Amino acid sequence: MNRIFSINPMSIVFKPRKEPRRILLCSPDFFDIIDVKNPYMQGHLGQVDQTAVSAQWELLKQVYVKWVDKGYLDQVLVLAGVEGCEDMVFCANQSFPFVDTNGIKSVILSKMKHPSRQKEVPYFKEFYESIGYKCIELTHTDLFEGMGDTIPHPGKQLYYGGYGHRSQATAYQEISDITGTPIIPLELISENFYHLDTCFVPLSEDAVMLCKDAFSNEGMAKIQSYFKKIYYIDAKEAIDTFCLNAHVINYPENTKKVAVLQKGSVQAIEALKAEGYEIEEIETSAFMKSGGSVFCMKMMIY
Ligand code: ARG
C-alpha cells in the first residue's frame, strides 16, 4: 500500500476523484440515547425530545432537497430507521462507498466497535444491494467505521483515514488495497475527536479546516504536506458547536460551493466564508447529545 510517500506529496499527480452526487439519510424514528459510546453522550441517557429530533432532522433533509433543486446534488434517498438501532440515524458510519477501478459502484461494510451499532450494518447492506452496489466485507480488519473515519481529498483519488478510537490503523492497508486508493492514516489522540469527521474538514484541493488537538505531531506533519492552507479551529469551538462535522460540497461542475453545519460557530464560519462557501446554519442539538451532527447524519453515495 501507498501509505508513506518518500517524495514531496505536493508533486504527486493523483487520479481525479469521481464525486458522489446523491445523499442518503436515515430517518430518526427510533433514535435514542441508551448508553455512553462517546464523551458527548455522558449525562444524556434517556434525554431524547422526539419532537426536536424529528424537526431538526427534517430541516437537514430540507437543506439537501433544496440543493437538489438548485442542481448541486442529484437526489436525496431515505432509509427507514429500525427499532432497536438507536444510532442508525448516523448513517456516515456503517459503510464506505466508492467506485472501483473497473467503474463498478461498490461499498465496504463497516466493522463497528459497539455491538448495538453492529446491528445497523445489515440494513445498509440490504439497501446498497437494492440499488445495485457490490458489497464488500473486510476480512483482515476488526474495527472500521466507514465514512466517519475515512474522508476523501477533494478532487483527488486520495483518502485520509482516522484511527485510534473506532477504526484501527491496519484497516487502511486493507481498504487501500480494495479501493486501489492511497490512504494517509491519521492517529486521533483525543476522545473528544473520536471520528475523523469530528475534527477534519477538507475545503478544497488546497485547504482544510481542523482542530489540531485531535492529531499527533506526526499526523499534523502529514496533513501539512498535503494541504497548502490550514484553518485552525479551537477545541472549545469544535467541541461546543460540532463545526468540524460540517458537510461541504465543492464540486467543480457546480456553480456554488455550499456548506451545512450546526449554528453558532465563529471560526469555522470565517474559514468557510474565506473559501467562498454559501453557508446554511441549522440546529442539530438533539443529535449532538449523542455525539454527532451534520456530517455523520448523511452518506454521500454514487
Ligand atoms: N452515538 C453515535 C456513536 O457514538 C454517534 C456517531 C456520530 N458519528 C460520527 N461520524 N461522528 O457511535
Image (spheres, rainbow, N blue to C red):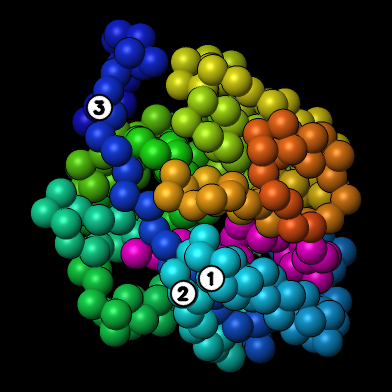
Q: Which residue is mark 1?
A: 68
Q: Which residue is mark 2?
A: 75
Q: Residue furthest front?
A: 255
Tell me how far mark 1 sits from mark 2, CA to CA: 6 Å
- Looking at the image, in which quadrant does ligand 1 appear? bottom right
Tell me how far mark 3 sits from mark 2, CA to CA: 34 Å
What amino acid is found at the position of numbered circle 2 in the picture?
A: Gln
What amino acid is found at the position of numbered circle 3 in the picture?
A: Asn
Instruction: Please identify the quarter of the rendering in which residue 15 is found.
Output: top left
Identify which residue is drawn at 51% across, 82% down.
78
Identify which residue is drawn at 86% across, 39% down.
266
Give the image location of residue 175, x and y in percent: 28, 46
| Total numbered labels | 3
Judge left or right: residue 228 versus residue 279: left
Q: Secondary structure at mark 2?
A: strand
Q: Residues within 10 Å of mark 1 (few under 14, many from 20)?
A: some
Q: Earlier in the sequence, mark 1 or mark 3?
A: 3
Mark 1–mark 3 CB contact (< 8 Å): no
Quarter of the image with the C terminus in it:
bottom left
Mark 1 or 3: in front is: 1
Q: Which residue is mark 3?
A: 2
Give the image location of residue 44, x and y in percent: 84, 68
Q: Which residues are magenta?
A: 282-302
